[in-house]
Amino acid sequence: MLNQILYYFLWSLAGAALFALYDYVGYNISLRKNWVNNKFVNPYRISQSLVQVLITILLLIFAGWQSALGFNIIWWSWGCDVLFYFYCTSLHIYKDRGIFTKQVLGNQVTWAWWTPYGLMFTKKEQAVRWTKLITQVITGLILTLAVSAI
């Protein structure tokens, strides 16, 4: 039973880590090419959504529905964004160290409106406090563990 839970949970985390890595590299490349958040049709967000669907399908086929659902729970609860910031700090490819401290701990995150907390308690341009974001991430990980136990 514990092996099964760990199996699904780790595959969910692997999907989240892969998605966040794509987001880190893809977002930074797209930012430099002026493909991000400045057009009615945003090419980067389309590619990002396609990658999320592809990872979900691959997890569904090869690791089970629990892993696919767990990956999307982690994504929706802002876990992939935390991994994005981890890549910013650790990889330092795009000269973006300190961005977590500045944006997240500085309570400047206005782009978490699509998360459960954001949809229920904030407006689209309103910043979500870091304590709410981290609580949401932890809740998402707990829910992913619960799904992994089914």
Image (cartoon, rainbow, N blue to C red):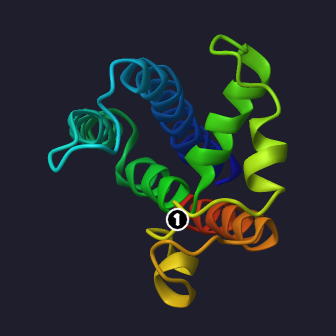
Residue drawn at the location 61% of the way across and 39% of the way down: 10
Query: Residue 108 occupies which quadrant of the picture?
Result: bottom right
Q: Is residue 95 above or below residue 1?
A: above
Question: Is residue 4 something one can see in this rendering?
Answer: no
Q: Is residue 130 above or below residue 82?
A: below
* Quarter of the figure that contains the N terminus: bottom right
Residue 85, can we see it? yes
Residue drawn at 73 percent across, 33 percent down: 86
Q: Residue at x 29, y 30 (%)?
A: 35
Q: Residues within 10 Å of mark 1 (few under 14, many from 20)?
A: some
As drawn, the residue found furthest toward the left would be 41
Q: Residue furthest bottom?
A: 121
Q: Which residue is mark 1?
A: 147
Give coordinates of residue 99: x percent, y percent: 75, 37
Q: Could you say where residue 98 lies in the image, as x and y percent from the top left?
A: 82, 33
Q: Is residue 144 left or right of residue 60?
A: right
Q: Position of residue 50 (x, y in %)?
A: 22, 37
The amino acid marked with disc number 1 is: Val
Q: Quadrant of residue 37?
A: top left
Q: Which of the pair 131/70 is nearer the observer? A: 131
Reply above or below: 40 against 14. below
Residue 96, percent from left and from top? 71, 24
Which of the pair 48/105 is nearer the observer? Answer: 105
Asked which secondary structure carries label 1, the reply is: helix
Corner quadrant of residue 51? top left
Q: Residue at x 62, y 65 (%)?
A: 140
